[in-house]
Image (cartoon, rainbow, N blue to C red):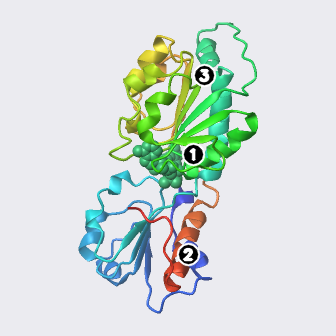
C-alpha cells in the first residue's frame, strides 16, 4: 500500500494530542497483530480491519475507525465487540471527488471518451456539442461524494436531481427523490452519476433496464462501487450507441485484469480507482474524524460517521 495511506504512530499522536482524551485510552493502528495490545485498546484505527481478530480480542474496544468511506466488506456488523461502534472516513474524499465529478461530466458532454476511441482508430470525426446548461444530471447518492459533485456542477446551470435513501433535500441539488422513484427520472437524464454506498439495496440497482431507459445519447459515471451497475449491459449499450459515453473508476476486480473486455469497449473511459483519493494529508484527515469523535465521546455527545 502507498506510504501516503500508512497510519503511523507519529500521525496518530499528532492528530490526537489536542484531544482531551478519556483517562484510559490506548490507540492501536495499522496492521497491528499484537493480541495483548488489542485486548488493552479502547480505540482501533486501521486501513483494513481484521474483523475476526477484533471480535476475538477487542473486549475493551469502544471505537473501531476505518480509513475508508466504503464499508461493504465489513457488513454485517455482527463481529463488532459488544459496546463498540464502527466509524468510517466518509467526507475525506469529498473535495477530490467533486473535482473528478465535474471533470467527468464535462468530458462526457464534450465527447472526450468518444474522441479517445476515434484517436486509437486514427479517425478525424467532428461532433460539435453546444453548451451544457439545462442538461439533466441524475445523481445516485448525495452524501459526502455526491454532495461535493453537485456543488461543483451547480454553477454550470444543470438541472440536478439527487437520489437519497431519505429523500431529504440537499442545498446543491435542485430536487431529491427516494430510490423507489428512480424509474420516473431516467428517460430525460443526460448524465447519470453513481456516488452511493454498496448495500443490499444498491447492489445491481442500475441494471440493464435502468441503463436502457436512459435518454438516447446519455452517458454515465461510476465513482461508487462496480456492483451497483451492470457493466455487461453498459458495454452492450455503448456498442449499440444507445449511450454515448461512460467513465468508470471502480471495478469488481482491482486492478482490472488485462484480459477484461471492458478495456476495448468504445467510448468507455477507464480510470484506476482514482476519482476520490487524495494522498496529500489523507491519514491526517481520517484521524481528524477520530479525534473529533474522541472529544465528543468525552463530552457525552453523539459520534459522527457511525456506520449502522
Ligand atoms: P455517504 O454515506 O456520505 O453518502 C452516501 C449517499 O448515498 C447518501 O446520500 C445516501 O442517502 C445515499 N444512499 C444510500 N443508500 C441509497 C440507496 N439505496 N439508493 C440511493 N442512494 C442511497 O458516503 P460517501 O462518503 O459519499 O461515499 C459513498 C460511496 O462512494 C462509498 O460508500 C464508497 O463505496 C464510494 N467511494 C468511492 C471512492 C473512489 O475512490 N471511487 C472513494 C470514496 C468512497
**Quick one: SS at disc 1?**
helix
Whether disc 1's CB lies below 8 Å from ligand 1 is answered yes
Q: In the rendered structure, are the residues bearing label 1 and label 3 in contact, judged by CB atoms less than 8 Å apart?
A: no
Residue drawn at x 46%, y 42% is: 178
Viewer-proximal residue among 245 and 119: 245
**Quick one: SS at disc 2?**
helix
**Quadrant assignment, res 117:** top right
Q: CA distance from mark 1 to mark 3?
A: 22 Å
What percent of the width, then of the height, locates residue 204? 35, 35
Residue drawn at x 40%, y 55% is: 71
What's the mark number on residue 113?
3
Return the residue at label 2.
291
**Quick one: SS at disc 3?**
helix
Q: CA distance from mark 3 to mark 2?
A: 42 Å
Q: Is residue 69 left or right of residue 155?
A: left
Return the residue at label 1.
146
Against 165, residue 256 (above or below) is above
Disc nearer the start of the sequence (2/1):
1
What percent of the width, then of the height, locates residue 242? 50, 14
Viewer-proximal residue among 135 and 96: 135
What percent of the width, then of the height, locates residue 137? 60, 32
Q: Can I make out residue 207 in this image? A: yes
**Quadrant assignment, res 308:** bottom left
Disc nearer the start of the sequence (3/2):
3
Q: Can I make out residue 1 in this image? A: no
Residue drawn at x 64%, y 16% is: 115
**Quadrant assignment, res 284:** bottom right
Report crowding for label 2: few under 14, some 14 to 19, many 20 or more residues within 10 A (C-alpha): many
Q: In the rendered structure, are the residues bearing label 2 and label 1 in contact, judged by CB atoms less than 8 Å apart?
A: no
Amino acid at each position: 500500500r502507498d506510504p501516503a495511506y500508512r497510519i503511523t504512530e507519529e500521525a496518530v499522536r499528532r492528530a490526537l494530542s489536542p484531544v482531551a482524551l478519556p483517562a484510559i485510552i490506548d490507540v492501536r493502528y495499522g496492521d497491528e497483530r499484537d493480541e495483548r495490545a488489542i485486548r488493552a485498546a479502547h480505540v482501533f484505527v486501521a486501513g483494513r480491519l481484521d474483523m475476526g481478530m477484533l471480535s476475538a480480542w477487542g473486549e475493551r474496544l469502544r471505537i473501531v475507525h476505518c480509513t475508508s468511506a466504503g464499508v461493504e466488506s465489513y457488513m454485517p456488523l455482527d463481529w463488532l465487540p459488544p459496546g463498540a461502534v464502527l466509524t468510517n472516513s466518509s467526507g475525506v474524499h469529498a473535495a477530490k471527488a467533486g473535482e473528478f465529478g465535474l471533470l467527468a461530466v464535462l468530458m462526457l458532454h464534450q465527447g472526450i471518451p468518444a474522441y479517445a476511441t476515434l484517436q486509437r482508430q486514427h479517425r478525424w470525426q467532428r461532433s460539435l456539442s453546444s453548451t451544457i446548461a439545462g442538461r439533466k444530471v441524475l445523481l445516485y447518492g448525495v452524501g459526502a461524494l455526491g454532495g461535493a459533485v453537485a456543488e461543483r456542477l451547480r454553477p454550470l446551470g444543470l438541472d440536478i436531481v439527487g437520489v437519497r435513501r431519505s429523500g431529504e433535500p440537499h442545498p446543491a441539488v435542485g430536487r431529491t427523490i427516494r430510490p423507489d422513484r428512480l424509474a420516473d427520472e431516467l428517460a430525460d437524464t443526460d448524465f447519470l452519476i453513481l456516488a452511493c454506498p454498496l448495500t443490499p439495496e444498491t447492489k445491481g440497482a442500475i441494471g440493464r433496464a435502468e441503463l436502457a431507459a436512459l435518454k438516447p445519447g446519455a452517458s454515465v459515471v461510476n465513482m461508487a462501487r462496480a456492483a451497483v451497475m451492470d457493466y455487461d449491459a453498459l458495454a452492450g449499450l455503448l456498442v449499440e450507441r444507445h449511450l454515448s459515453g461512460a467513465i468508470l473508476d471502480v471495478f469488481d476486480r482491482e486492478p482490472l485484469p488485462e484480459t477484461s473486455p471492458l478495456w476495448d469497449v468504445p467510448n468507455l473511459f477507464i480510470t484506476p480507482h482514482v476519482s476520490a483519493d487524495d494522498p496529500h494529508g489523507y491519514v491526517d484527515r481520517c484521524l481528524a474524524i477520530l479525534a473529533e469523535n474522541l472529544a465528543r465521546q468525552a463530552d457525552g455527545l453523539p459520534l459522527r460517521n457511525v456506520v449502522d
